[in-house]
Amino acid sequence: MQIESIVIKNYRVFQDVKLDRIPSMSVFVGANGSGKSTLFDILGFLRDALIHNVRQALTLRGGYKEVVTRGSNGPIELEIKFREVNGPLATYFISIGLGADGSPTVKRELLKYRRGQRGKPWHFLDFADGKGLAVTNEQDYGKPGIEEKRDQQELESADILAIKGLGQFQQYKIVSAFRKLIESWHVSDFHIGDARPSQEAGVAEHLSSRGDNLALVAQYMRERHRDVFERVLQKMSQRVPGVAKVEAVETEDGRIVLKFQDGSFKDPFIAKYVSDGTIKMFAYMLLLHDPNPHPLLCVEEPENQLYPKLLIELAEEFREYAWRGGQVFVSTHSTDFLNAMNLKEIFWLSKQKGVTVIRRASDARELEGLVTQGDLPGALWKQGLFEGADPR
Amino acid sequence: MKLVFLLEEYSMRVTLEALLPKILPTDVQHLLIDHEGKRDLEISIPRKLRAWRENDVRFVIVHDQDSADCRQLKKRLAKLCQEAGRSDALIRIACVELESWFLGDLEAVAEAFDHPQIAALKDRSKFRNPDRLANASDELRKLIPRYQKVGGARAIAPLLDFPRNRSHSFQIFLTGLRRLVGQ
């Protein structure tokens, strides 16, 4: 799946923002407080709203009044256009406001697909205040001359997303596919401290968003994807001086612990005593070499704790992950990371009168010209040529 | 003797890290300095050349041709060196860019990416003189869609064979360097 555009209204600093022609690899730069984290938070918000409900997703963020843009009454709106590989363009729209009793409510929720450039889109879902219509003959979608048939449905409550309420029923295949998609977004919230301790034995195929199953993922990769794991180790030894080998070892009490072998010493170090940067690089290597990429991977400031030059190749690895099928959003303050990017992969955020404006670097003619002359994007950003990106 | 290389980008550094041990005699030390693109390099050249205090140091500047006229570019760089009092600096242009050197040895590219059929393309007319291809990195990406600058350099550079490389600018780089270290 590939997200092609995002429109956000009344969500914190995003009063009315549109991101379009989003590439599979996208990098966001901007001063502190310009809204980079908020952009990622919106995707996390949608995921929370789906897994729990809208009220809980808002409560986690301080409640509706904190989330809605200052000076605005809402509603909070989010529109995402996305496409499966070679599939039709689909639109998901959600609008959230306060109900009559003052509690958060889904005012409108739509999921529609259109085939090609023409033709009427089918509304697979069209809900308002907990009630609405869902298409029941979705297997006929795209066949000529067939109209959609729709069924009236009611959700348990008005703060539940219809993609959740209906997504669990077999007959709504498209709705349920969309639901699964959002559920498998990976919005990284990596905590080095969580990745260090030993973990109870078990199986983990993917790194969790906090990274607290790192040892289990390492064990899984070594056992099930040996070649990939060997490549990860080879890269680790190139990038972190002294790291010759990493192993996930079972302890006597049935826990799994990571051990890092330094070529110069006989006994390995357990993860607890290894540097932050080493743990982080190892976690990124496992995440980015995952044989089954997440449809969307969001990582904030991957440069923290890492040696600057390492970001150049790490950036290439993020892009490779995107090429393998997982769209990637990264925010960064690293010139090295930006130097490895093309201008059309870079968006920059700036604040104007308290709200965020987002621009694409390749739309700025000056920047295009300078890169054609042989300057690198990160160098131009550092020189202040991304107008409004620097703090004032 | 010590050679100080001033380079445009990190990918050239990664390439030379793999090549230099095979070119330079063991008693010649080297230092690689990469930059953030052309302007960064050109600003850096006069300063580095003027400020260097070490004895028995020679500078090597490696610059991509890209869209520039090769002779004029070399002349301009030579002038920069001369003004900084180092007219003995060796200036070498990759025509048209680093990837042209890789296209000069498709057998290495084939091996690096485990695509044996690419090696068979080496006798196609356009690859017999890769320096003429205006956009070498695009050509390389056509062969290896997942090619990326640094990762690609890390994979290909260690496998480059010198005599069989058909990039003229690569051969000129090699001869210049060998002459400089007195071989």
Image (cartoon, coloured by chain):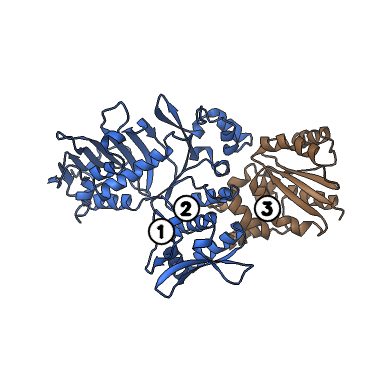
Chain colours: A blue, B brown
Decide: is A264 above or below A28: below
Apparent side of residue A100 relative to residue A238 in the rendered image (left or right):
left
Residue under the point 44% across and 28% down? A351
Q: CA distance from mark 3 to mark 2?
A: 24 Å
Q: Nearer the viewer, mark 3 or mark 1?
A: 1
- Can you give x and y, in whole percent of width and height, for residue A132 in the image? 15, 41
Q: CA distance from mark 3 to mark 1?
A: 37 Å
Report the front residue among A229 and A391: A391
- Can you give x and y, in whole percent of width and height, for residue A25 in the image? 46, 45
Q: Which residue is mark 2?
A: A321
Q: Secondary structure at mark 3?
A: helix
Q: Which residue is mark 3?
A: B15
Quarter of the image where one finds residue A292: bottom left
The chain that hosts pointer 2 is: A
Q: Amino acid at mark 1?
A: Asp
Q: Amino acid at mark 2?
A: Tyr
Q: Which residue is mark 1?
A: A212
Q: Secondary structure at mark 2?
A: helix
- The answer to whether any part of residue A101 appears in the image is yes
